[in-house]
């Protein structure tokens, strides 16, 4: 394992990967961890100017002890599957924030899971008035948009619909709370409580006026880490009002109003290069030292005690 310490994220521990994934399971069954497999919003990007923060669209791996959840199926899902190939359960719970393309397009490329007929992918979708994702995904993944329908892929899908705001309670007793977010066609925010730690993922969202929204502030209150849609800066936002996304400044305002200990910005704008994001991050940390911009493949031990230093994407496996 080649891991190294990174920035002090106020009790959060992050790792850099050079060869293998560190062991976040084992005796740390109380551990709550998060790994970013895709942090770019709207469309994937590639090129040397995106090497540090990454170009894949949203996908996150959340582990409550050894218990796995995957959030969103953006293009980052492919790498998530490849890197976890020896460590994936027979039943995989995939929680969608919503079904826009940048959060779904990676689904058929979730190898090796999709080629395994003995496995099940449970999808959960909360922004369609209780309808599950099946009809939408069948429409998306069908000729001529995609060469085959999902039902010819060996893995079994079980699609579950719920109404954002309802808690999700799983067969093993695990509970995940949810909230409806302001986004075109709606989006679902998630809250994980495990081992005395709290992780909230709030994306995609456009902030309201006034802000912070009180219901949302209560939802994320005292989180050890909040992941937030900071696609724009306040300077850019007036041109993009109504597009369904927020700013890092609004994320900081929400975090500070709700006693959130650390903030990770995701859904990065496709035009924001590494130097721009580093500049944005330094401006943000001048206001909230425990805030940071998420890097693809970065792992956070939520509530961990050790400090760490920034990831470099080109140093990974
Ligand atoms: Zn999105
Ligand atoms: Zn969206």
Image (spheres, rainbow, N blue to C red):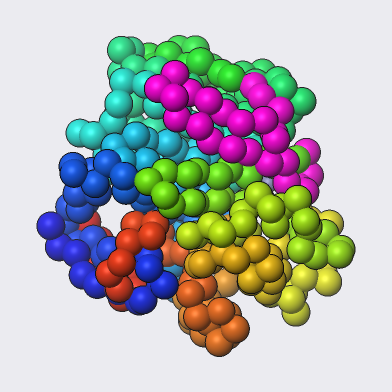
Q: Is residue 15 left or right of residue 136?
A: left
* Residue in the picture at 51% in, 15% down: 158
* Residue in the picture at 66% in, 24% down: 162
Picture quadrant where residue 87 is located: top left
Q: Is residue 1 left or right of residue 130?
A: left
Q: Quarter holding the C terminus?
A: bottom left
The residue at the far right in this view is 209
Where residue 191 appears, x then y in whole percent?
55, 44
The residue at the far left in this view is 1
Where residue 133 appears, x then y in whole percent?
63, 24
Magenta region: 161-185
Q: Quarter holding the N terminus?
A: bottom left
Residue 79 visible in the snapshot: no
Viewer-closest of 62 and 186: 62
Residue 229 visible in the snapshot: yes
Instruction: Say above or below: 249 vs 147.
Output: below
In the rendered image, residue 67 lying in the magenta stretch gets the answer no
Viewer-closest of 73 and 286: 286
Q: Is residue 298 left or right of residue 136?
A: left
* Residue in the picture at 41% in, 72% down: 10
Where residue 193 appears, x then y in whole percent?
48, 44
Instruction: Say above or below: 41 vs 157.
Output: below
């Amino acid at each position: 394992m080649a891991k190294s310490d990174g920035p002090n994220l106020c009790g959060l521990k992050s790792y850099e990967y050079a060869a293998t994934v560190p062991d976040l399971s084992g005796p740390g069954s109380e551990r709550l961890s998060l790994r970013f497999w895709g942090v770019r919003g709207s469309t994937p990007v590639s090129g040397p100017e995106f090497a540090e923060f990454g170009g894949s669209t949203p996908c996150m791996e959340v582990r409550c002890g050894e218990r796995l959840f995957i959030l969103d199926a953006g293009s980052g899902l492919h790498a998530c599957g490849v890197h976890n190939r020896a460590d994936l359960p027979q039943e995989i719970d995939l929680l969608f924030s919503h079904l826009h393309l940048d959060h779904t397009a990676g689904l058929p490329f979730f190898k090796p899971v999709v080629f395994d007929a003995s496995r099940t992918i449970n999808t959960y979708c909360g922004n369609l008035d209780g309808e599950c994702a099946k009809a939408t995904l069948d429409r998306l993944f069908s000729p001529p948009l995609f060469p085959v329908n999902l039902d010819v892929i060996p893995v079994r899908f079980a699609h579950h619909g719920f109404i954002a705001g309802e808690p999700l309670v799983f067969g093993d007793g695990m509970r995940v709370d949810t909230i409806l977010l302001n986004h075109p066609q709606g989006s679902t925010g998630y809250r994980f409580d495990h081992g005395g730690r709290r992780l909230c993922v709030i994306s995609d969202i456009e902030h309201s006026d006034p802000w912070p929204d009180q219901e949302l502030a209560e939802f994320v209150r005292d989180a050890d880490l909040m992941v937030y849609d900071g696609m724009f800066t306040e300077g850019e936002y007036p041109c993009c009002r109504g597009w369904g996304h927020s700013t890092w400044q609004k994320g900081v305002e929400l975090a500070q109003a709700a006693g959130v200990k650390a903030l990770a910005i995701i859904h990065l704008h496709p035009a924001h290069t590494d130097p721009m994001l580093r500049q944005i991050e330094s401006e943000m940390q001048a206001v909230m030292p425990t805030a940071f911009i998420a890097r693809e493949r970065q792992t956070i031990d939520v509530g961990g005690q050790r400090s760490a230093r920034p990831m470099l994407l080109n140093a990974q496996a």
